Amino acid sequence: MDHAAEPVAQPAAPPSSGLGARIGMLAVAGGFVAANGHFSQPLLPAMAHDFGVPAAAMGVLPAVTQLGLAVGLLTVLPLYDLFERRRTIVATLVLLAIAAAVQSTSHSLAALWGTAFLVGLGCCAAQLMTPYAALLAPKGREGQASSLVLSGVLTGVLLSRVVAGLVEQTIGWRYLYAGSSLCILLIAIVLAKTGTPSMPAQRTGYRSLMRSMGALIGAMPRLRRHALNGALTMGALMAFWATYAGHLLAQFQMNPLQTGLIGLVGVAGAAGASVAGGWVDKGRYRHAQLIAALLMLAGYALLWQSHASIALFCAGVLLIDLGGGLSHAGNQSSAFALDPAARGRINSVYMVSYFLGGAVSVSISTLLFATAGWSAVCGYAAVLALLLLGMELVRPVATLPRTDG
């Protein structure tokens, strides 16, 4: 199994009071990058009007972007272990900047969908930044650094819909993508000039690299567990996000703008992610996982009882997102520590599982909401959180071998 080495020269440690400006820059950059994958969701009616097509036809656009992201998680993230890391991130950022620029000038559906796929592919740059942040961090603070970047990514996703809606109401959606393209290009230039070079010591072919991902899965019980935990976490979160708008409309007669503002409570997820890595660095992964599962259980209990109280509903959203961010960042940071030389492939395995867990849960929860209502969705998500809790209580991750054999 091929492994890539750590950087040939460790960067100077950031000041003791913080992780340094470069880690903060990566967190902000990750938010900008991730937002591009979600800008289109509130823009679909305006885009459909511009292209003269039914809204249902334009509804394919977010799915195309997510398809590009899924392909990138599987095929682009492993490149972190194959090529010089800084250049890999910069190249992916340039791809995203070009795709966003072309999308802002697209005048045919074929061009729009093609660039949407490339936007999703380019958004993988955010997931390349999380292991890179761990690489730049001083020893013993790798988890804190990667979780800080993940916090920025989650914040970017959360704010993307609000920003997109505001820009569309003022200057139009094309200017949003054009402006985003310029911002991403600027980020690429800054990273190219200030980032630390990191060349893998052992070079291999792409085919061998992809084959080694299967070997990593087979050889690392803890990686398999982290991947499963990630799938359950994303599944529990997406059960809510896939159905909450319909519930708010039916129960509280909320319009899309009000629904979007309620969704801002989800900023708690970024707060949870920002602290999880520090806990992992201090050997408290189990604490993070147990607390995360309990928070999500409590959150869904409140959501189940929130039929007549919007305050209770918001409290439930805050708890499930806080728990979800804590679990996701804790699992990712702990997985990175398994083999620093294989962080790109480890991140690919983890994020593909995380993505698939959410995709499957969207289908299940949507069906449950349509056939059995909101209470069934809350019960289903609570079962996923119970599985997270039960597995860590019965057999903690720390009791699993790091590698088999």
Image (cartoon, helix red, strand yellow):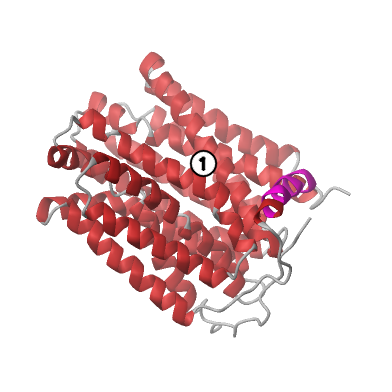
- Where does the image place residue 59, in percent across and percent down from the top left? 28, 34
Please state which of residues 265 and 8 is positioned toward the viewer in this rendering. Answer: 8
Tell whether position 52 is magenta. no
Left/right placement of residue 306 relative to residue 222 reads left
Q: Where residue 87 sits: x, y (%)? A: 52, 71
The answer to whether residue 32 is above or below residue 257 is below
Q: Image height check: is 203 above or below 251?
A: below
Mark 1 residue element: helix
Which residue sits at x=82%, y=49%?
401
Q: Identify whether 320 is placed above or below 130.
A: above
Assess disc 1: are there few (<14), some (14-19) or many (≥20) residues with their C-alpha within 10 Å of its C-alpha: some
Q: Where is residue 375? Give x, y as percent.
A: 41, 22
Total labels: the figure holds 1
Magenta: predominant secondary structure element?
helix
Q: What residue type is labelled 1?
A: Phe
Picture quadrant where residue 201 is located: bottom right
In terms of image quadrants, where is residue 34? Answer: bottom left
Q: Residue at x 28, y 45 (%)?
A: 112
Query: In the displayed structure, does residue 81 sit left or right of residue 216?
Result: left
190 on left or right of 323: left
Above or below for 159 versus 53: below
In front here: 358 or 308? 358
Q: Residue 218 magenta-drawn?
A: yes
| Residue highlighted by disc 1 | 355
User: What residue occupies the far left of the structure in this picture?
Assistant: 170
Residue found at the far top of this picture:
371
- Can see residue 294? no
Magenta residues (range): 209-220
